Amino acid sequence: MITRLEGEEESHNSDEWQLQRGTSTENEESDVKPPYWAGPANPHAQFPQPQHLDGLGLAELPEWSEGYPFYMAMGFPGCDLSAEDLAGRFQFSRGMRRSYDAGFKLMVVEYAEGTNNCQAAKQFGVLEKNVRDWRKVKPQLQNAHAMRRAFRGPKNGRFALVDQRVAEYVRYMQAKGDPITREAMQLKALEIAQEMNIPEKGFKASLGWCRRMMRRYDLSLRHKVPVPQHLPEDLTEKLVTYQRSVLALRRAHDYHVAQMGNADETPICLEVPSRVTVDNQGEKPVLVKTPGREKLKITAMLGVLADGRKLPPYIILRGTYIPPGKFPSGMEIRCHRYGWMTEDLMQDWLEVVWRRRTGALPKQRGMLILNGFRGHATDSVKSSMESMNTDMVIIPGGLTSQLQVLDVVVYKPLNDSVRAQYSNWLLAGNLALSPTGNAKKPPLGLFLEWVMVAWNSISSESIVQGFKKCHISSNLEEEDNVLWEVESELQGGGEPPVESMAESN
């Protein structure tokens, strides 16, 4: 009984509430009025038709910048509301954090200078404090980009004393004319931090710290500008001829991927001057002092195979004899009066390196790609390669930067590694001085160890990708497509030549 009576009472109250609601809705003069933003009481009432844009006066609106608030730029038809009214009626939160670009801030500043800060704040819907702050930094706003929103300039680092001492070290090296790299700055910072008893976990002298420190002290990296190799005018014609010769040899002999190689000689300086130094921003040419013996160099004959393997380095020293000392294993060392690669040394390289390569079989034919050096294409070298069942391919002149694997993927990381090891050796304090005060060159055995370490650091994957990039070990079908594409560019479009189609068939 109790449950039933409670249910009847709830139903009665619900009916009474609905009756009161209907009465208040129909009575237009009731004390309870709906808010002005509420919709029509009748759910079936028709919404007002949208007005045409011509009647809104959009053509008379001023051209505001991107930072101008949208609700102020468009306005509302039929009412003229200020920023305060809009913020109050539509409950725009003044405490919400917003960002404004420099163009908008300058517009507010100019308006405030013509009227006052309070009027400008009301006109543009911003806080009066923002107007005061923007007027104080007007020169910075005028010099900044119109779309810039923040001025987070250089600040003091967490270890300001370390930054200051590293900056003094950089100035000292600049005064001496010695090159300074970011790695040297990091090592110096770690040394200073150790002197100041700063724990290693608290200060790591990372690359990010170095960049921020350079920005705080207006320092930048200055690079030595290399002279690019000028490609020949008949580039396309030479590329087609070279690709045809490689394709013809591959189709005729079906080389195994481990029997296709590329070899070339390159100079490696004993004292490598740094190509990067830290200097002040905005400086023009930067003079860097070198030890003066960067022209003292060795010649290294390097070779790689299409399967990613590296042949033992063939080192040619300048002089009439090989100096005594301990040299790293895994390389062949020879000497020449001028340190050059000659015809006799090329034949010797074929005997001690190419013939002895791993996987070389007497009955399995190979292909060796060389550049246009005159010591490579002599009759004696050709006969030696024929006796080794090896075909020679000469890269056209001026195209070694595009078609030689060693130039594409090996030489840059090799030289970078040698420079890094040489810089670490200098920073470690191992540099000896002669009686006259000049710096001595590093020991020959140590330098050859650097070369061997750099050579072993070249990854096999990069060599494999280099052969494919130079279109030497790619699939024959892909080679055909590349050849036809180049030929179509050469002849202005159209079908490939008949002889090329016959070769591909």
Image (cartoon, rainbow, N blue to C red):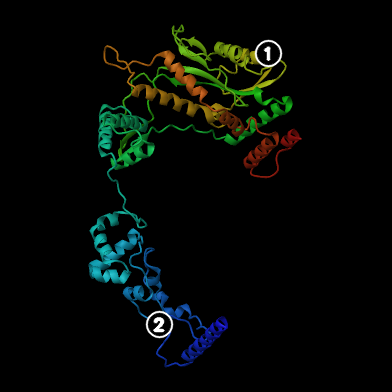
Which of the numbered marks, if any, corresponds to residue 209?
none
User: Is residue 125 placed above or below 353 in the rendered structure?
Assistant: below
The spot of residue 31 in percent (x, y) is: 40, 90
User: Is residue 390 placed above or below 122 in the rendered structure?
Assistant: above
Out of 101 and 404, give the one closest to the viewer. Answer: 101
Left or right of 442 in this view: 53: right
Left or right of 4 in this view: 386: right
State the residue position of label 1.
387
N-term mark: 1 or 2 = 2
Left or right of 262 in this view: 253: right
Say what secondary structure mark 2 lies in. loop
Out of 92 and 176, give the one closest to the viewer. Answer: 92
Left or right of 305 in this view: 59: left
User: Is residue 109 placed above or below 414 in the rendered structure?
Assistant: below
State the residue position of label 2.
78
Quote the CA–CA distance across marks 1 and 2.
98 Å
| Dot 2 crowding, Cα within 10 Å, few <14, some 14–19, many 20+ | few
The spot of residue 47 in percent (x, y) is: 51, 83
Out of 399 and 407, give the one closest to the viewer. Answer: 407
